[in-house]
Amino acid sequence: MDIKICGLKTRDAVEAVIAGGASHAGFIFFEKSPRNVEPETAGKLAKSVREAGIVPVAVTVDADNGTLDRIVEVMKPGILQLHGKETPERLAAVKTRYGLPVMKALAIREAADLDRIAQYRGIADRFLFDAKPPPGAELPGGNGVPFDWRLLSGLDPDIDYMLSGGLNADNIRSALMLLQPSGIDISSGVESAPGDKDPALIDAFFRSIRHPANDNVA
């Protein structure tokens, strides 16, 4: 199972992610987010994770070609994660332009929200299922809100997806008892404050996954 820690901005956080053995490291390019990072900073941090065998992921929200051009050139991501209202046509265009795999994030609250999967199948290389943001929220993800994970229990087993939304060291085992996602994604669940990754919480999250009996160990 892949493990992605998202919203990285500092060297300390990157070192904790490398030490924990993550498969993916996410860098967010969205000005409204407390996890927003400049491409130059992300590029330096991404170099470290890449050298550790971790895939750097560029997370964008309805970004135009100019923005993506700069991110791809400077950061050199292994995957592009599109977390906005991008259409299937936009996904296809992005894949063609950059020659990179694309992960499409979809917001889930009820069963009907899963109907959107069909239009992206065969285009998106992977999905990320996150909770719909609460009313008034400015961020499409990273709000620390879970959704009813049971909604995903009937998915076609061929759908490659990462589970996201409100995950932390205390509830990850419950999620994995219900589902068998090919990957999990966490951001706010390893923060001491919005946008501030806590190496101790990152370590606790990895330990909770690998040692179920110690779920509540801080």
Image (spheres, grey):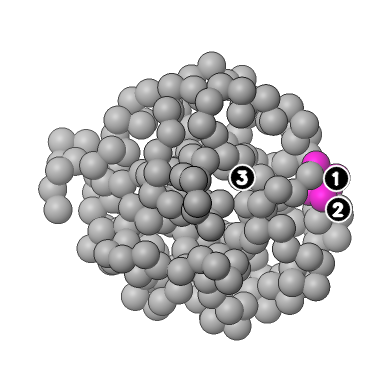
| Mark 1 lies on residue | 89
Residue 79 falls left or right of residue 1: right
The image position of residue 132, as x and y in percent, is 52, 41
Say whether marks 2 and 1 touch (CB < 8 Å).
Answer: yes
Question: The residue tagged with tag 2: helix, strand or loop?
Answer: helix
Q: Which mark is residue 93?
A: 2
10 Å crowding of disc 1: few (<14), some (14-19), many (20+): few
The picture quadrant where one finds residue 119 is top right
The image position of residue 164, as x and y in percent, is 46, 43
Marks 2 and 1 sit apart, C-alpha to C-alpha, by 6 Å
In the image, what residue type sits under mark 2? Ala
Query: Which of the two residues, 140 or 134, is positioned nearer the viewer here?
Result: 134
What's the magenta region?
Answer: 88-92
Q: Which mark is residue 105?
A: 3
Question: The residue tagged with tag 3: helix, strand or loop?
Answer: strand
Q: Residue 120: say if magenta.
A: no
Q: Is residue 136 above or below residue 42?
A: above
The earlier-in-sequence mark between 1 and 3 is 1
The earlier-in-sequence mark between 2 and 3 is 2
Q: Residue at x 58, y 71 (%)?
A: 31
